[in-house]
Image (spheres, rainbow, N blue to C red):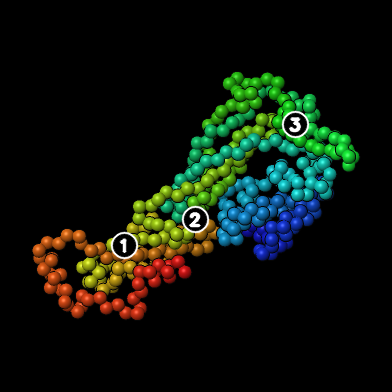
């Protein structure tokens, strides 16, 4: 079982954003590879701290983690999914603890060089209610840029392969040193000397690849999953590929309406069925369930079927199915039917006589949202 992110940083769930950042900086400095050369345990702790901070420092990810735990990021890969690598950490969070290590925050051994990473790709995946309830593995064709094996590179002479250039400026406060991305190589540290056939100016080819994406049960509209290293390649032979960001969309279902992990279903019955009582089959995604409606049931009655909804991401429980009973009033009547209802107009048994326990429609709506 994965270690709790709050425990990794040594903070409580009520910690503020500044406290989370301070706790991460302390852990990052403690386990920084420059302070612990060759120590695999320190490196592992360094990665854990960065993974915890990447989630807890983002309000949206933190909210999902607080609600669903690690399962909120199952199948995501990369950050929040256990796939951290040192280059990602230095690229995203180096500024937090960089001053404690001089120029070495950008990479290992004090060189200041960062591994070049390709750009991320984003796709949308639309899921049916069936796929959301049961989870699914999708095979998606992705168009990405890959570095041609026939493209040849040499070390950039402007930055000597570091990807950065340093400038010293004289000011009234003294000599000020600043670093920026190398204008010649764009930060890759490499210059192209020959391109492979059919490549662009960076030696890249357009490629189509089928990517398998495992989507856990219980995902929601707007969630994002990350498939590591399935974005565009870096234009540096020693670089790493970007990531594939998968945005979840939900298809509207003809029968059910989703409300978090609960499902709503409108069941229509006739006036005769309501008066006499009846058993009805409701066809679910994974089978069917029979419910019994007592005689005299009123329109607007809601029946709750436990554990017939959507599983939450941690897999420990399921939501409920709420069946809303609606009595269908016929719009046209023949003469015999009209005569019957005219005869019943003055019948006491047909006159409305609600009890205090019979809530109005607005009371039911209020209770539903309370």
- Which residue is at the front of the view, 354 or 29? 354
Disc 3 is placed on an element classified as loop
| Location of residue 239 in the rendering, given as x and y in whole percent from the top left corner | 69, 34
Q: Which residue is mark 2?
A: 218
Q: Does the image show residue 226?
A: yes
Disc 1 is placed on an element classified as strand
Q: Is residue 123 above or below residue 325?
A: above
| Location of residue 359 in the rendering, given as x and y in whole percent from the top left corner | 36, 74
Q: Residue at x 55, y 30 (%)?
A: 207
Q: Which residue is mark 1?
A: 267
Q: Which residue is mark 3?
A: 182
Work out how far the residue at label 2 is from the one at label 3, CA to CA, in angstroms: 45 Å
Q: Residue at x 25, y 63 (%)?
A: 328
Sequence order check, earlier mark of 2 and 1: 2
Sequence order check, earlier mark of 2 and 3: 3
Q: Residue at x 45, y 48 (%)?
A: 127
Q: Quadrant of the N terminus?
A: bottom right
């Amino acid at each position: 079982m994965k270690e709790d992110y709050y425990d990794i940083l040594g903070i409580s769930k009520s910690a503020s954003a500044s406290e989370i950042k301070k706790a991460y900086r302390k852990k990052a400095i403690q386990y920084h590879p420059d302070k612990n050369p060759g120590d695999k345990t320190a490196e592992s702790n360094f990665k854990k701290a960065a993974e915890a901070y990447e989630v807890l420092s983002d309000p949206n990810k933190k909210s999902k983690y607080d609600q669903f735990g690690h399962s909120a990021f199952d199948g995501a890969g990369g950050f929040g999914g256990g796939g951290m690598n040192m280059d990602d950490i230095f690229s995203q969070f180096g500024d937090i603890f960089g001053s404690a290590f001089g120029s070495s925050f950008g990479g290992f051994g004090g060189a200041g060089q960062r591994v070049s990473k390709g750009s991320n790709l984003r796709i949308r995946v639309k899921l049916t209610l069936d796929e959301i309830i049961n989870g699914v593995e999708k095979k998606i064709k992705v168009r990405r840029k890959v570095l041609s094996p026939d493209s040849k590179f040499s070390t950039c002479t402007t930055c000597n392969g570091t990807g950065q250039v340093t400038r010293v400026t004289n000011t009234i406060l003294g000599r000020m040193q600043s670093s920026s991305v190398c204008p010649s190589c764009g930060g890759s540290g490499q210059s192209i000397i020959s391109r492979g056939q059919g490549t662009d100016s960076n030696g890249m080819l357009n490629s189509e690849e089928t990517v398998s994406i495992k989507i856990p049960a219980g995902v929601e509209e707007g969630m994002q999953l990350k498939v590591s290293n399935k974005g565009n390649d870096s234009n540096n032979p020693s670089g790493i590929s970007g990531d594939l960001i998968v945005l979840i969309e939900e298809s509207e279902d003809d029968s059910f309406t989703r409300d978090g992990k609960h499902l709503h279903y409108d069941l229509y019955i006739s006036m005769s069925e309501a008066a006499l009582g009846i058993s009805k089959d409701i066809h679910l995604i994974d089978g069917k369930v029979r419910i019994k409606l007592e005689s005299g049931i009123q329109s607007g009655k809601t029946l709750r079927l436990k554990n017939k909804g959507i599983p939450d991401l941690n897999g420990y429980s399921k939501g409920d199915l709420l069946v809303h009973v609606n009595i269908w009033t016929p719009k046209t009547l023949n003469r015999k039917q009209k005569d019957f209802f005219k005869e019943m107009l003055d019948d006491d048994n047909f006159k409305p006589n609600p009890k205090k326990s019979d809530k109005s429609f607005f009371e039911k709506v209020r209770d539903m949202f309370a």
